[in-house]
């Protein structure tokens, strides 16, 4: 009888030790490190729009990079070039982090074209973000180094024109998706901007926009299907 009781005590002790072992906290795993900003748990969806393109000013012989991104309210954004180099990283704070951004458009400095082409290689650029609602945002855009030709147009630089009959005319170019015409009065800050099809070669400037004896700057942008654009600038002066 005594040996039977000893046996029961041993079994009870082993059972109790097993229960204590099961209830003890498990040691943290050292294999998995903390998740990175853009690898946290959660679903993902694409940005509504992601663009990257070049703008070349043929009159000033300078160029710059331009970027546009749009999507669900986001608080973090990262852009990486085709070589894996980080181009931009944004993290909102305060009220902007709470409510988020939707659209962002920016452009870089405008040095000589070769410097820009070297800094921004052609190829795919990846857009990665974190929405206010914690899910990931992804997208990509392809940057091309192929530029449309420079537009040629009239009035010629410094030409005096009739303010009631100003027509900007240009020669149609191949490989162009559309044209953008901009007329500005630097003195007042007033400007007009019109986008027309690739088959349009002239634009009449409304007389109500113009003042007599005033200098205006005119720009024509030839925009290619890849998004790149080439600008030609000129000035004209309205007569009395």
Image (tube, rainbow, N blue to C red):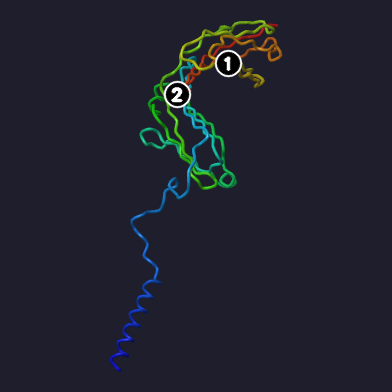
Residue 144 rendering spot, x and y as whole percentages: 41, 24
Residue 160 in view, yes or no: yes
Residue 40 rendering spot, x and y as whole percentages: 45, 49
**Left or right for 29, reference 74:** left
Residue under the image location 41 percent in, 37 percent down: 86
Q: Quadrant of the N terminus?
A: bottom left
Tell me the tag on residue 99.
none
Residue under the image location 64 percent in, 5 percent down: 161
Q: Nearer the viewer, residue 30 or 22?
A: 22
Residue 88 in view, yes or no: no
**Farthest residue toward the left?**
3
Upstream in the sequence, badge 2 or badge 1? 2
Residue 107 rendering spot, x and y as whole percentages: 50, 29
Query: Taking 84 as reference, is 20 above or below it?
Result: below
How far is disc 2 from disc 1 in space, using C-alphas?
A: 29 Å
Secondary structure state at the residue bearing disc 2: loop
Tell me the tag on residue 111.
2
Residue under the image location 54 percent in, 47 percent down: 133
Query: Taking 50 as reference, is 136 above or below it?
Result: below
Q: Nearer the viewer, residue 11 or 116?
A: 11
Q: Quadrant of the C terminus?
A: top right
Which marked residue is nearer to the observer: mark 2 or mark 1?
A: 1
Query: On the image, numbered disc 1 is attached to which residue?
Result: 196
Q: Residues within 10 Å of mark 1 (few under 14, many from 20)?
A: some
Count of numbered badges drawn on the protein: 2
Residue 15 rendering spot, x and y as whole percentages: 35, 79
Q: Residues within 10 Å of mark 2 (few under 14, many from 20)?
A: few
């Amino acid at each position: 009888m005594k040996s039977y009781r000893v046996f029961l005590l041993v079994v009870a002790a082993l059972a109790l030790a097993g229960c204590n072992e099961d209830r003890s906290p498990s040691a943290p795993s050292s294999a998995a490190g903390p998740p990175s900003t853009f690898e946290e748990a959660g679903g993902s969806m694409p940005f509504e729009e992601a663009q990257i393109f070049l703008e070349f000013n043929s009159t000033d012989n300078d160029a710059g990079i331009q970027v546009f991104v749009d999507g669900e309210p986001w608080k973090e954004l990262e852009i990486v070039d085709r070589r894996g180099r980080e181009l931009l990283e944004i993290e909102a704070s305060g009220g902007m982090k709470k409510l988020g951004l939707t659209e962002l458009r920016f452009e870089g400095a405008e040095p000589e074209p070769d410097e820009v082409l070297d800094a921004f290689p052609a190829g795919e650029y990846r857009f990665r973000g974190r929405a206010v609602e914690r899910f990931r945002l992804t997208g990509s855009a392809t940057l091309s180094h192929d530029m449309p030709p420079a537009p040629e147009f009239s009035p010629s630089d410094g030409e005096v024109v009739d303010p009631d009959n100003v027509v900007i005319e240009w020669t149609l170019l191949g490989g162009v998706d559309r044209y953008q015409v901009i007329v500005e009065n630097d003195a007042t800050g007033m400007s007009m901007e019109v986008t027309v099809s690739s088959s349009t070669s002239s634009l009449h400037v409304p007389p109500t926009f113009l003042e007599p004896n005033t200098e205006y700057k005119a720009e024509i942008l030839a925009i290619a299907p890849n998004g790149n654009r080439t600008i030609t600038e000129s000035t004209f002066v309205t007569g009395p």
